[in-house]
Image (cartoon, rainbow, N blue to C red):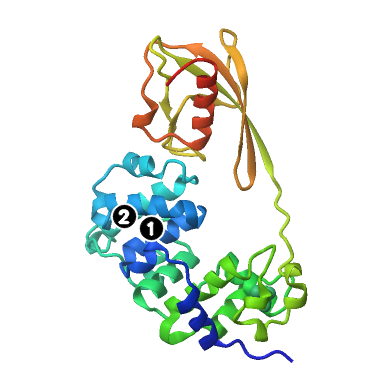
Amino acid sequence: MVAQLSQSTLLAWYAESKRDLPWRHTTDGWQILLSEILLQQTQVSRGIGYWLKLVERFPTPQSMAEAEVDEVLFLWQGAGYYSRARRLHALARQVCLPSSEGGYDGVLPTTSAHLLQLPGIGPYTAAAVASIAYGEPVACVDGNIRRVMARQAKSANPSVKEVEQWANRNLFHSDAGDWNQALMELGATVCTPKQPKCDGCPIAPSCSGQLDATAYPEPKKIKRKRLDLMCELRYDSSGLPFLVQRGEDGILAGLWGPHMEEELDVESLIFIGEVKHVLSHRDIFVQVWLGICRQGMDPSTVAVSALDRKILALGDRQGYRS
Ligand code: SF4
C-alpha cells in the first residue's frame, strides 16, 4: 500500500534543491512567458543565454511590438524552431493593440483563459505563466509531469486527460506556481527518463512504479521523416555568399540562407558535399552545389539558421570565406 503524495515534502524539497535559474528571480509575467516559450524546445542550459539576451533587448511586450520580426529572429538564431520567435512577435503586437481592437492595451493578460487566446500559447504555457507569475490555481501538464504521473500511478500509457486529472487532483492551490515548478523540477532532475534517482526522491513513498520506473511511461515511437534538399551556395568575388530571406512558411521561414529547393538546376554548379541536419522528428539532407554571384552579403548581419550555418561552414572548408 503506497502513501498519498505529500505536497509539503515535495515543496520543501523544491525550496531546498531547485536550480538557480535566472527567470526564477522575477515575477514579471512577460519575462516568465519568454522563458516558457524558449524552454518548449530548447534545453535549459542553452535557454539561459537566449533568455538573458531577449530580456535585455525586449524587457516589455511594447519593446518587442515596436521592433521588426527580423530583430527577434536575429536574437533567436541557433535556438531552433523559429516559428516560436515569429509567434512571440505576433503575440507582443496583439497584446499592445488597444482593447477596442481585440488587444490588451500593452498589458499581458493574467489569466490562463486569456493567455490561451494569444498566438503561440497552448494550455501548458498558459497554465505555467498564469500560475507562476500570477498565482492562478491551475495545473500544468508537460512531458516531465506526465512521466512523474505515469510512474507514481504505474500507468504505462496515460492519456492527456488522465494526466490532467492527476495534476488537478494533486494541485497545491495556495501556491500553484511553486507546485507546478516543483513537479517539473522533479521530472527534470530526479525522475529523469533513463536513470531516475528514486533513492533521493522526495515523493518515493507514494510511488507505485519505482521498482520498474523506466517502464513507465512506455516510450513513444517517433516516426522520423527524411527531407532531401538541394542548395546553391554562390559567392561573390570578395568571398561573401548570396543569401535570400525565406518566405512566411516552412521550418526556416523568415530566416536568411543560400537558395534551397527540393529540385534545382545545377548544370553550371560544382557539387561540394552533403550536409545533414537532425531535428526532433526529421532528418534533413542537403546537397550543396557551388557557384558564383555578383553580390553577396555578410551573414553575421542577418538571422541565419543552424542548418544554413553548416552549409556556409562547408563552403568555408572549400576555401571560401564568409
Ligand atoms: S520514486 Fe522514482 S519513479 Fe517514483 S517519482 Fe520518484 S524518481 Fe520517479
Above or below residue 322? Residue 103 is below
| Dot 2 amino acid type | Val
| Dot 1 amino acid type | Leu
Q: Quadrant of residue 129?
A: bottom left
Between residues 153 and 11, which one lies in front from this camera angle? Answer: 11
Q: Quadrant of residue 61?
A: bottom left
Image quarter where ligand 1 lies: bottom right
- Left or right, 14 with respect to 197, comes to left
Element type at mark 1: helix
Between residues 60 and 98, which one lies in front from this camera angle? Answer: 60
Give the residue drawn at x 36%, y 43%. Answer: 75
- Mark 2 sits near ligand 1, with its Cβ under 8 Å away: no
* Residue 136 appears in the figure: yes
Give the residue drawn at x 43%, y 38%. Answer: 248
Give residue 297's position: percent from left, percent from top: 36, 21
Q: Nearer the viewer, mark 2 or mark 1?
A: 2
* Residue 90 appears in the figure: no
On residue 152, which mark appears?
none
Circle 1 residue: 34
Give the residue drawn at x 48%, y 24%. Answer: 258
Sort mark 2 into few (<14), some (14-19) or many (20+) by Cα contacts within 10 Å. Answer: some
- CB atoms at circles 2 and 1 under 8 Å apart? yes
- Mark 1 sits near ligand 1, with its Cβ under 8 Å away: no
Circle 2 residue: 55
Above or below residue 222? Residue 102 is below
Sort mark 1 into few (<14), some (14-19) or many (20+) by Cα contacts within 10 Å. Answer: many
Question: In which quadrant is the N terminus drawn?
Answer: bottom right
Which of pointers 2 and 1 lies earlier in the amino acid sequence? 1
CA separation in Å, label 2 and label 1 = 8 Å
